[in-house]
């Protein structure tokens, strides 16, 4: 049975099965595509292991999506040569090693590609320096290493491993802005006034030496008043307070123009030493996370504006307005919660922002925010600068993560051509081809990351079959009701398995039993029994108790 989108069963003769056992995951080469009288036929070319094992399911996912942890021998030879010949060259670079520049990342991050510094100026404005790993210095355009990175498009962060865009010797080593190490960077220095406006800026190559490898947890603790942490990091305490001040100024500016700020905590899955789920929790954004987000957006916008006004061919991060049909449908669903988007023929992100504000801190807020999010288009990479709807930004690009996103590496190269006149501008047609490709690889990565998490969650729920759960109704299909558990794990109920006769009422967006008064409405909380968790289909099935009794 295909696990992908092939859509039909494939017959494999006994002579072509190799040593595959029942329920094994296998890669198959099609030898006959089928006709009206015969199914497609194939032969096993790779055995990936039992489908009852989550690790094998992730290996199959990697194989199916044509992802890889490994690099070619040529790419590794080039990597080793880069490391062997590397030295910190200050030529045509600003020396920022005397500044208290820091990195702020998750505790488990190893590819540190951005560092930040803030200083309050005498005129009351703020100086913000966003220093980014100068990957383009080491990885030259169209080399084997560059072409492999381009093909990957981005790093992929699966639940149990990272599939990096560059070998770890580069991503976690020579380019990573590790604490107390001199590193080559590309910096965007901005002077920002009290209204959040960038009144002056400069982009330049630089050398930094991060004074601390900070974690979000530590920064949040310091800003929350943890005295032990404040004492430990007393040398940067005042700067962290200034960072918070500037972050709030930038956030207020974004809010005023209508930028959509979803309050959607990230679902985190923690694995133990045996790669089994140890804990599932929602990771909230603290002030540390918001500081970095606000500073990176400021740098990305500043770089995008520079490239735009210099009329250079480049790659932008664009986000289009949602389709009218989607907004009409969204309005029907939002009406269930008492919200409405007016004037959706002239849609503006501020209209979404206002609903998000109204729904904040309510029990159904996450459901409302997710519903709005799914109505929006997916951001992508383009050579046309059409702006970013969600951020309410006229010009936007990706500059801040060249270790893990190829788009950023290309933007670095374009940006450097604005400093060094000897570099030829890029051709728009070439950039367009790259933009389309990396938009696709990004979607593949997002799908793979989500699926890897789902695999582990299904395995986690298998041990709990038979348990009673509290679940919230989150959506409907003609024959299904979708729920979310208290741990925010998605599950569903196939209404055709019920002895009652349920019909999806599309107009009122609910599931109704025609023979009784039983109704399932969006946002309802009900008790349910966990019936099944299937690793092959990745479905988690429940049976609501109010249907049984």
Image: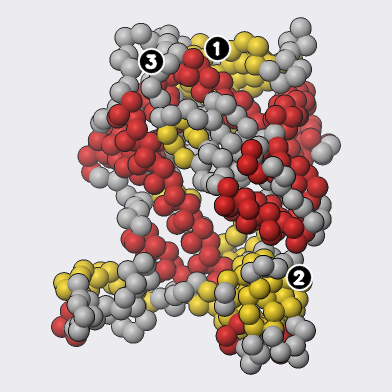
Q: State how far apart marks 3 and 2 are (Cα).
A: 56 Å
Q: Earlier in the sequence, mark 2 or mark 1?
A: 1
Res. 417 mark: 3
Of the two numbered discs 2 and 1 in the rendering, the one whose residue sits closer to the viewer: 2
The answer to which quarter of the image holds residue 239 is: top right
Question: What residue is disc 2 on?
Answer: 524
Residue at coordinates 28% horizontally, 36% vertically from top-left? 147
Q: Is residue 88 visible?
A: no
Q: Is mark 3 on a helix, strand or loop?
A: helix
Residue 18: x and y in percent read: 21, 79
Q: Is residue 367 visible?
A: yes
Instruction: Bin the neighbour count of mark 1 within 10 Å (Cα to Cα): few under 14, some 14-19, many 20 and up.
Output: few
Question: What residue is disc 1 on?
Answer: 202
Q: What element carries label 2?
A: loop
Q: State how far apart marks 3 and 1 are (Cα).
A: 14 Å
Near-viewer residue (219 or 296): 296
Classify residue 156 as left or right of residue 119.
left
Residue at coordinates 26% horizontally, 78% vertically from top-left? 10
The answer to which quarter of the image holds residue 548 is: bottom right
């Amino acid at each position: 049975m295909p696990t992908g989108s092939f859509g039909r069963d494939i017959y494999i003769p006994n002579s072509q099965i190799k040593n595959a056992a029942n329920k094994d995951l296998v890669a198959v080469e099609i030898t006959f595509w089928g006709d009206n009288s015969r199914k497609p036929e194939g032969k096993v070319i790779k055995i990936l292991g039992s489908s009852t094992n989550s690790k094998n399911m992730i290996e199959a996912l990697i194989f199916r999506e044509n992802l890889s942890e490994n690099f070619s021998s040529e790419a590794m030879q080039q990597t080793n040569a880069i490391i062997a010949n590397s030295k910190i060259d200050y030529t045509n670079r600003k020396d920022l090693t005397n500044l208290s520049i820091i990195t702020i990342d998750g505790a488990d991050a190893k590819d540190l590609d951005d560092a930040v510094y803030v200083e309050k100026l005498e005129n009351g404005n703020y100086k913000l320096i966003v220093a980014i790993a100068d990957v383009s210095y080491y990885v030259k355009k169209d080399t084997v290493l560059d072409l492999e990175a381009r093909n990957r498009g981005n790093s992929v962060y699966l639940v149990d491993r990272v599939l990096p865009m560059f070998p770890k010797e580069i991503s976690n080593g020579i380019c990573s802005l590790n604490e107390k190490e001199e590193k080559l960077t590309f910096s965007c220095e901005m002077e920002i006034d009290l209204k959040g406006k960038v009144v002056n800026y400069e982009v330049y190559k630089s050398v930094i030496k991060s004074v601390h490898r900070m974690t979000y947890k530590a920064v949040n603790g310091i800003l929350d008043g943890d005295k032990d942490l404040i004492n430990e990091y007393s040398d940067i305490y005042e700067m962290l307070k200034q960072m918070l001040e500037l972050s709030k100024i930038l956030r207020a500016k974004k809010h005023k123009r209508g930028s959509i700020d979803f309050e959607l905590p990230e679902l985190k899955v923690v694995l133990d030493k045996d790669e089994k789920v140890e804990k599932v929790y929602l990771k909230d954004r603290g002030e540390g996370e918001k500081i970095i987000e606000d500073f990176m957006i400021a740098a990305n916008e500043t770089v995008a504006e520079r490239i735009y006004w210099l009329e250079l061919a480049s790659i932008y991060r664009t986000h289009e307005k949602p389709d009218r049909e989607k907004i009409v449908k969204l309005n029907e669903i939002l009406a269930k919660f008492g919200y409405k988007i007016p004037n959706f023929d002239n849609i503006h992100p501020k209209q979404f922002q206002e609903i998000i504000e109204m729904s904040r801190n309510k029990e159904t807020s996450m459901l409302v925010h997710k519903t709005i999010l799914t109505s929006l288009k997916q951001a992508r990479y383009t050579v046309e600068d059409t702006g970013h709807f969600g951020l309410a930004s006229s010009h936007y690009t990706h500059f801040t993560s060249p270790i893990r996103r190829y788009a950023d590496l290309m933007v670095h190269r374009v940006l450097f051509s604005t400093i060094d006149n000897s570099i030829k501008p890029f051709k728009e047609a070439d950039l367009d081809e790259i933009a389309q490709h990396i938009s696709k690889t990004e979607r593949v990565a997002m799908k793979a990351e989500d699926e890897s998490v789902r695999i582990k969650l299904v395995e986690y729920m298998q041990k709990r079959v038979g348990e009673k759960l509290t679940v919230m109704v989150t959506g409907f299909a003609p024959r299904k009701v979708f729920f979310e558990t208290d741990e925010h794990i998605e599950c569903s109920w196939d209404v055709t398995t019920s002895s009652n006769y349920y019909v999806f009422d599309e107009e009122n967006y609910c599931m109704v039993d025609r023979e009784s008064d039983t109704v399932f409405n969006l946002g309802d909380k009900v008790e349910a029994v966990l019936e099944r968790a299937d690793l092959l289909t990745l479905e988690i099935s429940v049976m609501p108790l109010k249907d049984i009794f």
